[in-house]
Image (cartoon, helix red, strand yellow):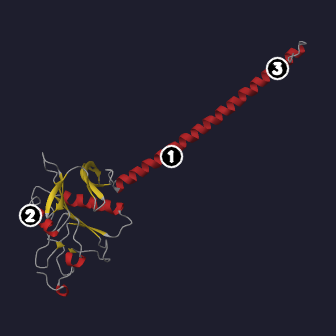
Amino acid sequence: MLHPHSHLPTAADLPDSDDTPVDNELQDLIPGLLKLLLSTIWTERQDWFWGTDMALYFDPEDEPIVPDGFLALGVPRVKDENLRRSYVLWEEQVVPILALEVVSRKRRNEYRQKKLDYAALGIRYYVIYNALRQVKEHLEVYRLEHGEYVLMTGNPVWLPEIGLGIGRQRAGYQGIEREWLYWYDQTGKRYPTPEESAQLAEESAQLAEERAQLAEERAQLAEERALAEARTRQQVTMQLETLRQHLRELGIDPDA
């Protein structure tokens, strides 16, 4: 049972992690990429927060849960200039809407206990990514229905309460070519990374420059053709006038 609110520890009083290092670089890169994409998709929004490997406290008498990543909506993106040390439910008053776990060779009960824990907290979506699977799908997205998680199908999977889809696709990120998790719009179009957007902008600028150069070359060619036609007409006119003059010298009226 929770203590009165005035006696509850604050985020400053609580440890900000479980001091357990990640044993797979993807556990840092994949949540980081999803957060980076959100910052570009929701540039005008300040009512969301993404936590990466951050302690999520739900009861002052229990140990926190530390998802690889989680998303909360309806909370300030930035609480103060020192940012969040942890996510404390009795302070935030908002349960995260999505939790993400990236499975490594060292299992951490992603498919069992954590599903029960996140369901008990009321987290709407539970996302598990396991690149080590050989037969089953790498990405599983569960939706909480009547207290239990139900597996959703598709790639990407649309999450209406969030207004985004989540899915997997092979592409390049930070110079690494592999399968990554991305956010998608309702049509199934993937949101690009800042690297991809910059590259696309560079390619578009280069294409515009090439088009402008081609237009300039075409205009120059048209001008040269016009000059050539003018010279040809002038030469024809001169030749006709020479012929007319020659006919006159022979006593022939060229107009008759």
In the image, what residue type sits under mark 1? Glu
Q: Which residue is mark 2?
A: 113
The label shown at residue 209 is 1
Q: Quadrant of residue 252?
A: top right
Q: Along the horizontal axis of the image, is 105 left or right of 13? A: left
Q: Secondary structure at mark 1?
A: helix
Taking the spot 63% from the left edge, 35% from the top edge, the residue there is 222
Query: Is residue 56 among what the camera can see?
Result: yes
- How many residues crowd around disc 2 within 10 Å: few (fewer than 14), some, or many (20 or more)? few
Q: Earlier in the sequence, mark 1 or mark 3?
A: 1
Above or below: residue 146 compared with residue 206: below
Judged from the image, the secondary structure of the residue bearing numbered disc 3 is helix
Q: Amino acid at mark 2?
A: Gln
Nearer to us in this view, 128 or 80: 128
The residue lying at 23 percent from left, 76 percent from top is: 93
Amino acid bearing label 3:
Thr
In the depicted structure, whether residue 1 falls above or below residue 205: below
Measured as percent of width and height from the top left, residue 53 is found at 19, 66
Judged from the image, the secondary structure of the residue bearing numbered disc 2 is: helix
Pointer 1: residues within 10 angstroms few (<14), some, or many (20+)? few
Q: Name the side, left or right, on which 182 lies relative to 206.
A: left
| Whole-number angstrom distance, CA of label 2 to CA of label 3 | 104 Å
Q: Would residue 23 be visible to someone looking at this image?
A: no
Q: In which quadrant will I find the C terminus?
A: top right
Residue 22 quadrant: bottom left
Viewer-nearest of discs 2 and 1: 2
The residue wearing badge 3 is 242
Q: Residues within 10 Å of mark 3 (few under 14, many from 20)?
A: few
